[in-house]
Amino acid sequence: MAMSTVSLLLWLLAVHGICVPVSAQVCRLLGQSALPLISADRDINIGAIFSLHKSALLKIHNFTAKPEPTTCGSLNLREFKFAQTLIFAIEEINNSTQLLPGVSLGYKIYDSCGSIAQAIFSGMALMNGYEETLSDTSCSRRPAVYAIVGESNSSPTIGLASLVGPFSLPVISHFATCACLSNKKRYRSFFRTIPSDYYQSRALAQLVKHFGWTWVGMVRSRSDYGNNGIAAFEEAAKQEGICIEYSEAIFKTDPEEQFLKTLEVIKKGTARVVLAFMAFGDFVLLLKVIAQHNITGIQWIGSESWITSQNLAETKEYSFLSGAVGFAIANAKIVGLREFLLNVHPDQEPNNDILKEFWEIVFLCSFKNSGGCTGSERLAELQNEYTDVSELRIVNKVYTAVYAVAHTLHNVLKDVRSSTNTSKGELPTPQKILEYMKDVSFTVKTGEKIFSDASGDPVARYDLVNWQSAENGSMQFKHVGFYDSSLSTEQRLQVNQEHMLWAGNSGELPVSVCSESCPPGTRKAVQKKRPVCCYDCIPCAEGEISNSTDSSDCFPCDLEYWSNESRDRCVLKVVEFLSYTEIMGMVICIFSLIGVLLTAIVSFLFYLHKETPIVRANNSELSFLLLFSLSLCFVCSLTFIGRPTEWSCMLRHTAFGITFVLCISCVLGKTVVVLMAFRATLPGSNVMKWFGPLRQRLSVVSLTLIQVIICVLWLTTSPPFPYMNFSYYREKIILECNLGSVLGFWTVLGYTGLLSFLCFVLAFFARKLPDNFNEAKFITFSMLIFCAVWLTFIPAYVSSPGKFTVAVQIFAILASSFGLLFCIFAPKCHIILLKPEKNTKKQIMGK
């Protein structure tokens, strides 16, 4: 390595001093060496960096004098417990005959004080050692340790992994969860025994969705842990349809004003659920401010950094956290750890100041003052975060990290010995250890299977914990579910909601939404300039439905269906046709039957008086045939009522056309008879022999036959058929008879109209012929009514909707039939019944 590079590394090593050259090849460190707080040198040493103290006291340097060593304050019992767990695991491995036989592990534990700079400083000391005099060969020797366990926080770990990565020195973290550390291009030698926040963030998003919360507030640490965790959560929340009302960031070094500002945002927010994705140290400071202002009623969701903190759970001022829910690393039981922790004593290492500091803190005494610490105090009598082994979630990850290094070393040494055929073999290089660590797989004594994916992350398995009040007033962590990323998407999250308590120890699930759910039959309409979770519920339009809650759109029903009143279901459209059961159909039936009855009465009356002059006048056969055809016309109207079928559609139009032509033919025959009769009275006239009874019958048959032929052609080419009309009404179906051939229909109607017009003209000419009873004027009136009815029928028929089209046609049939019946036969019936004296030949002939 070039001398300039050596000098640069030595300068980085001496954060608290400078390195000045003694000769061309030797540097002497000015300043203090970075010494481990706890160490034991053995065959192979493992490095570790923990935040044994909660904070580093910041000092302002004027760069005019040698900086003094960094001072750390407030011993962190949890991190001290991590350090002792690492020592316990190493001693356990050294006593094992199965793992690393003949090789003893040592350790060098450094304190980062929660500082990124101090973590980097400690990492360089673990790589280079801590001699005061360094030469140009210092960089070519093996590192002081072969792997580093730590750090507990993401930001210091990022700095540490960035530093040691180029030198292929493995870093195994037990608590750095930032998803950014999964980037193997930047952190090629980084591994961890705790899942990445990528999985935790997605699990939290699924959890929020599971409980129906779509409107949440967020508070995060302004660090790599909080920023990356919340970024992953926001991405997953967007996919799950969850909206963020606010997102506040704080850090433990922020002034109190920043915490108060965050508190005001939480108070003014309408979200009842708040996600705190925060490091433990940051969250404690926020909780103190919340406790001072008595903020309650918030449903807290926590990240794994604080959700199982006994320190928080045992603090009664934080009782407002009751009901908090979040994911925690799976708990474990480590056999023998409690006994090891309780055996820690300052006498084990009299020169180790941190053991004395620990003893003074837990027993609230001092070794410096007389009557203070005696050393006879018993840890077993204490109940604190250090002695409690009920929650070994993160402690187990430290334990697992040590075993991961040990198994890697075991595999490396085994292969080295087999390749060199020696009992000892050479010590492996960091590059070799890094290569083997990528594929390490083993099962720890707790029964957990340990292996890493391509990013150096283990399988994400979390316990879902719920804070519930214990009998002594403190909080206990109730296991209410789990999350396992190795399972299918539908099975990853399992929640036992029946055993959960919520904010304020309530058994009722809180509601946190910007807008209430839209019921079926409505759709969501996003409010202007607000998140998608804030919306109005708009009823679906007619013919559209939404059959689910919070539907974004209404969906049109199929052609034969229509929406019900509540717009949540498609029902079959009402099929409309003129039915016998409805009032209009009943009225028409009654009038039709009345017409048939009146026709029958007239026929019976004429039959009784068939020999009288008034019946015999104008051909009684045509009269009876006309009465028969009129009865058929009345009956024909009934074919238009009822559900249209193929047969009824063909019958109603053809029967109507044929019966009316038969009727008009008879009237036409009677009209011609009147005209011919008066022509026959002229001298020398023999007209009647050309229009006698036989020819009258033939004319009726011929005229009717033409209509029959037209109908046959219509039925054979394009007959009428039942048809569902969807276009006239959107909400119902008009079941009607499609005409088939429109030409056929209008031909039938036109032929009937032509005969009617011809009959009207002839009757009109004969209306003033001299006679006491001139039937021509009554025929004229009847045909006038007939033509008027059918002329008004055409526009009414075209413009009438649905079943009213059929009703108009029936009305035209009945009106014209009654017109013929009354105009032609009523006067005769009047004479027969009321004026029998006029029913004589003399009266009929007149002049």
Image (tube, rainbow, N blue to C red):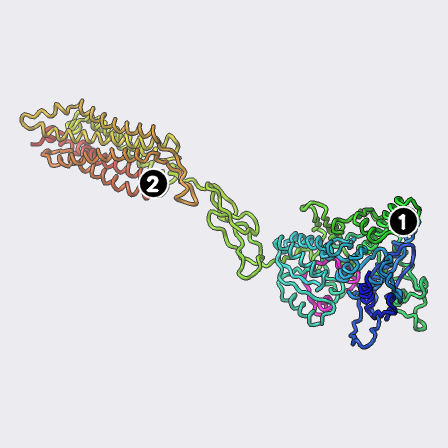
Residue 100 badge? 1
Question: Does dot 1 land on a helix, a strand or a loop?
Answer: loop
The quarter of the picture where the C terminus appears is top left
Residue 712 colored in magenta in the image = no
**Picture residue at 91% right of the left edge, 58% below the top:** 41
Where does label 2 land, which residue? 805
Question: In front: 170, or 224?
Answer: 170
Q: Amino acid at mark 1?
A: Leu
At which x and y percent is residue 73?
Answer: 82, 69
Is any part of residue 594 visible from this angle? yes
Q: Which corner quadrant of the image does residue 420 belong to?
A: top right
Q: Which residues are magenta?
A: 286-315
Label 2 close to label 1 by CB (< 8 Å): no
Q: Amino acid at mark 2?
A: Thr
Q: Nearer the viewer, residue 31 or 25?
A: 25
Crowding around mark 2 (Cα neighbors within 10 Å: few <14, some 14 to 19, many 20+) is some
- Is residue 298 found left or right of 672 in the rendered image? right
